[in-house]
Image: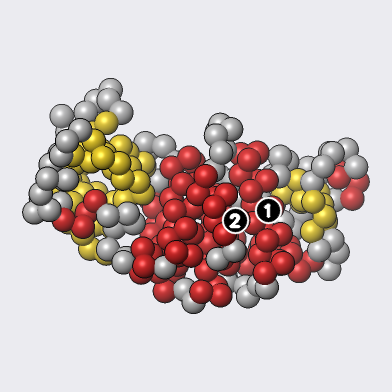
Amino acid sequence: MPLLQTDAVVLHVADYLESSRILRLATRDAGVLSVVARGARSSKKRFGSAVDLFAEGQAQLQLKQGRDLHALNSFDVTRARPALALDLGRFTAASTIAECVLRLVHDESAPSVYLALVDSFDRLATAKPQNTASVTLGALWQLLGEVGYRPTIDSCVECHEPIDPASEARFHPLAGGTCCVHCARRIPGGRLLPPEARDTLRQWLDGGLPPLADPAIRAHQRLLREFLHQHLPDNRPLKAFQLWEQGGW
């Protein structure tokens, strides 16, 4: 059974048997993996804060070929991020990001996704309360881009003609972005985005943090939910996303 030493961050924790825990880890070198931390509940000496949500560090994994559950030998924490657990808004937002990563990323190397994930947690941990929603929206759009679902904003997703940045355009989640006037007539549904909404989305995709008031935040949460619904691999509800969207944090 090969050993893997890799950077990792904890996305989910569940009790297992009498003394262990099962963790879902996002790793730099092997994507998302399920691991068992034996004895993690009975003693803090071996893993300590490694079994805390959103903790980041160096994990040593015993990989089991052909198995979905691997063994966690050790986890040296480099960043615990207690700020994410001390504020309900930040915790709900971080849980939403973790939930989406668990649904979109599989057990294959994706260093850019890993780096985008840890950067989003770092930014969220230091964000002011009024900026938490914008940080979360930006993090989720960037993660979608890293896994291959970056939406088309400045040209038609169908005919590739440039779209006037000063004009409104219809955004179609299923098509994967904005459509020109002619192509939008052939595709039912979608939402009409004004220029400022498209500019906000563009800033998020490029790593920016545009300031937003509550009505705009709600509209962008709804747009992101519709986009995720079209591109997630199954139809299971996003429970953390629903809580984050409804909570008003």
Residue 24 in which image quadrant: top left
Could you say where residue 101 lies in the image, as x and y percent from the top left?
45, 46
How many marks on residues?
Answer: 2
**Amino acid type, mark 2:** Glu
Could you say where residue 178 lies in the image, as x and y percent from the top left?
76, 51
Q: Are marks 2 and 1 in contact (CB under 8 Å)?
A: yes
Q: Residue at x 38, y 65 (%)?
A: 84
**Amino acid type, mark 1:** Arg
Question: In this rendering, is residue 232 above or below 160?
Answer: above
Q: Residue furthest top?
A: 66
Q: Nearer the viewer, mark 2 or mark 1?
A: 2
Question: Is the image coloured rainbow, by chain, by secondary structure, or in one colour?
Answer: secondary structure
For residue 54, the mark is none
Residue 187 in which image quadrant: top right
Q: CA distance from mark 2 to mark 1?
A: 8 Å
Question: In this rendering, is residue 58 above or below 164?
Answer: above
**Residue 37 visible in the current orientation:** yes
Pointer 1: what residue?
222
The quarter of the rendered structure image containing the N terminus is top left
Q: Residue at x 83, y 68 (%)?
A: 166
Pointer 2: what residue?
245
- Judge the density around disc 1: few (<14), some (14-19), many (≥20) Cα neighbours within 10 Å: few
- Judge the density around disc 2: few (<14), some (14-19), many (≥20) Cα neighbours within 10 Å: some
Q: Residue at x 37, y 38 (%)?
A: 108
